[in-house]
Amino acid sequence: MEITYASPSSNNLAGVAAAASSSSSSMSSSSLTRPIKIIPLQHPSTAPVSSFPSSTSSSPFHSVFSRWKTKVKRMTLLEWIEMFLPCFRWIRTYKWREYLQVDLMAGLTVGIMLVPQSMSYAKLAGLQPIYGLYSGFVPLFIYAIFGSSRQLAIGPVALVSLLVSNVLSHIVDPSDKLYTELAILLALMVGILECIMGLLRLGWLIRFISHSVISGFTTASAVVIALSQAKYFLGYDIERSSKIIPLVRSIIAGADKFSWPPFVMGCLILAILLTMKQLGKMKPLRVLRAAGPLTAVVLGTTFVKIFHPSSISLVGNIPQGLPKFSVPKEFGYVKSLIPTAVLITGVAILESVGIAKALAAKNGYELDSNQELFGLGVANIAGSFFSAYPTTGSFSRSAVNYESGAKTGLSGIIMGIIMGCALLFMTPLFEFIPQCALAAIVISAVIGLVDYEEAIFLWRVDKKDFLLWTITCASTLFLGIEIGVLIGVGFSLAFVIHESANPHVAVLGRLPGTTIYRNIQQYPEAYTYYGIVIVRIDAPIYFANTSFIKDRLREYEFNIDSSTKRGPEVERIYFLIIEMAPVTYIDSSAIQALKDLYHEYKSRDIQMAISNPNRDVLLTLAKAGVIDLIGKEWYFVRVHDAVQVCLQRVQSLTDNSKTSESSLTEEKSSYLKRLLKERLDEPSNIDLESGHRQQPFFNRDLDPQLEPLLSRKS
């Protein structure tokens, strides 16, 4: 359906359109009219909200609930089972001949890697090594059942271990039994938080934390972790802290206690680990990457067994057997542990879910981040009843698991079996592992977290994100982990708010030979029209950015380059066209600002037109009375439709001005002619206000500046 506008100089465009369609012959004979066709915009009904379909309900909760209700009704029994037990998805499609061998090999490889790493991370957390082994046992089986990722390897990780140590060491001494109880309680709290966020589908909250913040935070944490392990290399104790200055000061202060044997052994083992890790990047030798930690432990233990050096500290006695069921205690400390539980949960979402999604994409299956979060939560809750401290997905072990060819969660079950065997049969051998070997394993793992390449990339691409990276990294290093995260997140949110409150607003011009309108800054060849400003707002309009948008619109009214303008020449702006296609939402404050702008422009004889608003925005405008205020005839489907109508109105203004001036010239006497000439030399107030000025009559068919918008055929 199309509407033809034939007499744009009339105030009632709708009426003129109807008259024009009934008398095309008279229209074609007029020299002042040219038929144009536009697509009519479908306006929403102004009926009460209750009469609208549920899809357009004003309540987002109602819409979400309706979609969820529809989804639940359509779910089959198999889908219900897969929702509560994600492992059923790969169990029912398991290809035994194709998958079994690679899953066994991957599980064995990562399991061998996990045993020494878990002991190392437990020491980093300030716990006995046995609790690292416990944390790598029960959670693996639970996650294989409830987790949705088929390649993610969970267990103790360096970053979470550092967070546990940093918080609990300020509450109680690590040698106290209460320290261990609080670490186990923390696992329960983290698990509950993860389950709640997964069930309520709140994983999207972490999207507000910029990748620059995460990169800066992990880089600083890696430096702190490496320095905290220096005591096992140097042979003397250093201050336990998450700030770089106290750590460095403590290292320097104890330099007189330096011992060569652990330093030499630690450096040699670290060099071996880094060499094997580097060689493991080559496909034929990738098994070396997983074998690195085991090699470090074997070499260190062999050296101690042969030479019995007294200056190298050992792990010591480790209890043999599987963990026993026990309920977490010390609930009186829950309140003081909440901030850390929230932080660890955030790290779990950012690290684990991010890795799981990447692995799922590489292996061609879908992953629900909220289901993944729920699986991690259940694994932590179950682990807390078997003496585990908080666990999450490990980047290094997950990468090895994927590279080893793991296809399903069976590889995770194999890892758990390897850990169970270690607990049952191998703990007497762990007694002679040098502490410097475990420290070397930690340092080699966290070196990969130092993301200097990201900093270089951000400096080259986006200075703002580089600033965010630098602020987060520096604040984490010098002010501590919790404060560093808060500052980084605070700046990240501040940048988001700034971008939202200062949206991009573009002036549009027409690309030559088309009916397409684009940003004149991006497309210098695009041209505009005299008397018309076309503006596109590239963001939702709400209370925080209305003032900025109003200022930009006023600025564009006066500061438009006239060198690329076409059409009938006038001295000022008569029409403002707002392209609303990118505007997904508009609130009450924006509605009021739009009304104020309309009245302000109306007082200066400027007409506002709206182009291509989406249904939700149009419905909001209708309810607020803005459609009736501006006039339904000033809402258009396309920018081009609005330009056609406005351009003919501008043309009619210039034609009327020339006609009136011609009649005055014929009727006045010579005396009046001289008087008129004198007055024309000095523009009147009316001329100054309207901006009308004389121009020679020209043929629109021959003047290339008009460039007909559409064919003149009726």
Image (cartoon, grey):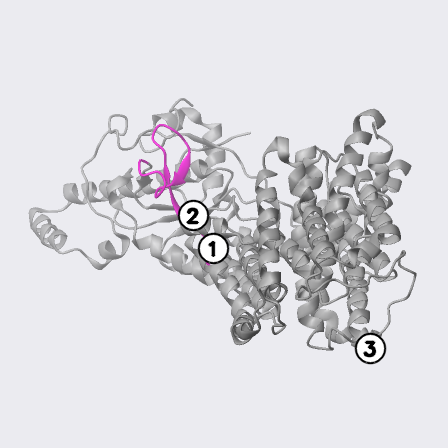
Mark 2 or 3, closer to the camera: 3
| Relative to 514, residue 618 above or below | below
Numbered mark located on residue 465 in the image: 1
Quadrant of the rendering where the N terminus is positioned = top right
Numbered mark located on residue 245 in the image: none
Mark 1 or 3, closer to the camera: 3
Say whether marks 2 and 1 touch (CB < 8 Å): yes
Left or right: 80 in relation to 289: right
* Magenta highlight: main SS: loop
The x, y position of residue 374, in whole percent, is 79, 52
Ranked by sequence position, the earlier of labels 2 and 3 is: 3
Left or right: 347 in relation to 50: left
Count of marks, rendered view: 3
The x, y position of residue 303, in whole percent, is 69, 53
Where is mark 2, residue-wise? Answer: 461
| Residue 522 among magenta residues | yes
Secondary element at image label 3: helix
Secondary element at image label 1: helix
Query: Of all residues shown, which one is farthest toward the top?
Result: 713
Structural crowding at the residue carrying mark 1, measured as other residues with C-alpha within 10 Å and reported as few (<14), some (14–19) or many (≥20): many
Where is mark 3, residue-wise? Answer: 332
The x, y position of residue 281, in whole percent, is 59, 38
Over which residues does the magenta segment extend?
502-525
Using the image as rendered, state which of residue 433 and residue 524 is in the foreground: 433
Q: Work out how far the residue at label 2 is from the one at label 1, CA to CA, in angstroms.
A: 9 Å
